[in-house]
Image (spheres, grey):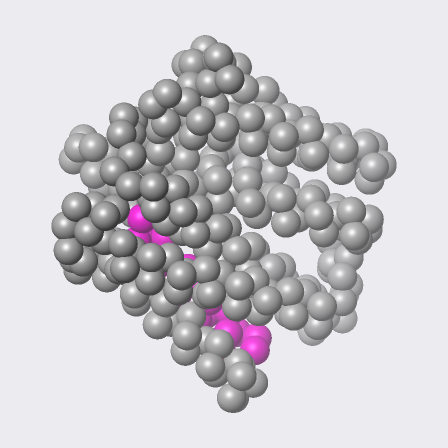
């Protein structure tokens, strides 16, 4: 990929992806579901091209903003698949805004250039961490969606964007939590087991590690409470939001401080 990592290419793709998300948000007011779904797919593919131009560049770049961009891309992937399985779903403006803002944020803050990869295990460690972020973020979106639908049901007014039964949304939420928990566990184990090869130092309890372990503990309690005590509704949602907030602080928060506040790689 000759132009991979080119600032001009990244800029063009970022603007195109942002305009794609904005166009979908405007189009859903005037066009049918198939047009909106196809537009969302195109915007998502442009978003993927932006990520590829950075991650496959020479050297590759990554940081807090690209991590958020990948997470948003994975959430939109989940929603795009669901919209094809459930054609009655509408593209939510909040998700489209998330995609648009994440693309522009990653363009403004492309992250750190990785001139050398210290170990062949590093890409696996990154992939596991990114995938866990994406699945947990998808769970958060579904939990928020579930609460809105549940609130509208209590008010005896059907939510206009429901599209799926409440119990189906709840099952999907906990499936995403369970899958994200498994991948987060694998990420922590990989970081511990290969720490000397990945970072040429022993396992260290830095801010990223502490927040990651705390997040893992919250998700473990949530899943245990769901299994043994049948937790659902507000209690489960609050636990999910708390664990997700800690996970966000683990990498994105620490990298934001390093890159933007301290101006360090």
> Is residue 144 visible from the viewing direction of this image?
no
Percent coordinates x, y for residue 252 in the rendering: 33, 45
Q: Quadrant of the C terminus?
A: top left
Percent coordinates x, y for residue 146 in the rendering: 63, 65
Q: Residue at x 59, y 67 (%)?
A: 175
Q: Residue at x 27, y 26 (%)?
A: 115
Q: Residue at x 27, y 29 (%)?
A: 116
How many numbered callouts?
A: 0
Pick the front one: 3 or 149: 3
Percent coordinates x, y for residue 45 in the rendering: 63, 30
Vertical comparison of 183 with 34: above or below: below
Principal secondary structure, stretch drawn in magenta: helix
Vertical comparison of 229 with 71: above or below: below
Quarter assignment of residue 203:
bottom left
Residue 239 among magenta residues: yes
> Is residue 154 visible from the viewing direction of this image?
yes
* Left or right, 129 with reference to 156: left
Quarter assignment of residue 44:
top right
Residue 238 among magenta residues: yes
Percent coordinates x, y for residue 25 in the rendering: 67, 34
Pick the front one: 125 or 255: 125
Q: Which stretch did the figure color magenta? A: 232-251
* Left or right, 89 with reference to 230: right
Vertical comparison of 166 with 66: above or below: below
């Amino acid at each position: 990929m000759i132009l991979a990592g080119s600032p001009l290419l990244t800029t063009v793709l970022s603007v195109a992806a942002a305009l794609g998300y904005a166009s979908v948000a405007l189009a859903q007011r005037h066009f049918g579901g198939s047009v909106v779904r196809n537009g969302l797919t195109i915007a998502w593919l442009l978003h993927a091209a932006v990520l590829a131009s950075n991650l496959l560049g020479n050297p590759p770049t990554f940081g807090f903003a690209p991590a958020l961009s990948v997470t948003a891309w994975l959430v939109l992937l989940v929603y795009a698949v669901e919209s094809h399985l459930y054609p009655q779903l509408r593209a939510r403006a909040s998700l489209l805004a998330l995609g648009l803002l994440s693309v522009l944020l990653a363009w403004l803050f492309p992250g750190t250039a990785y001139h050398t990869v210290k170990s062949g295990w590093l890409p696996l460690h990154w992939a596991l961490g990114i995938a866990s972020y994406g699945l947990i973020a998808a769970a958060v979106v579904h939990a928020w969606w579930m609460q809105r639908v549940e609130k509208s049901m209590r008010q005896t007014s059907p939510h206009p964007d429901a599209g799926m039964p409440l119990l189906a949304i709840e099952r999907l939420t906990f499936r995403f939590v369970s899958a994200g928990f498994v991948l987060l566990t694998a990420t922590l184990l990989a970081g511990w087991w290969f720490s000397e090869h990945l970072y040429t130092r022993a396992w260290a309890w830095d801010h990223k590690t502490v927040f990651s372990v705390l997040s893992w503990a919250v998700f473990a309690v949530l899943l245990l409470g769901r299994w043994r005590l049948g937790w659902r509704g507000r209690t489960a949602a609050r636990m999910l939001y708390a664990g997700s907030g800690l996970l966000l602080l683990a990498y994105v928060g620490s990298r934001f401080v390093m890159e933007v506040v301290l101006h360090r790689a």
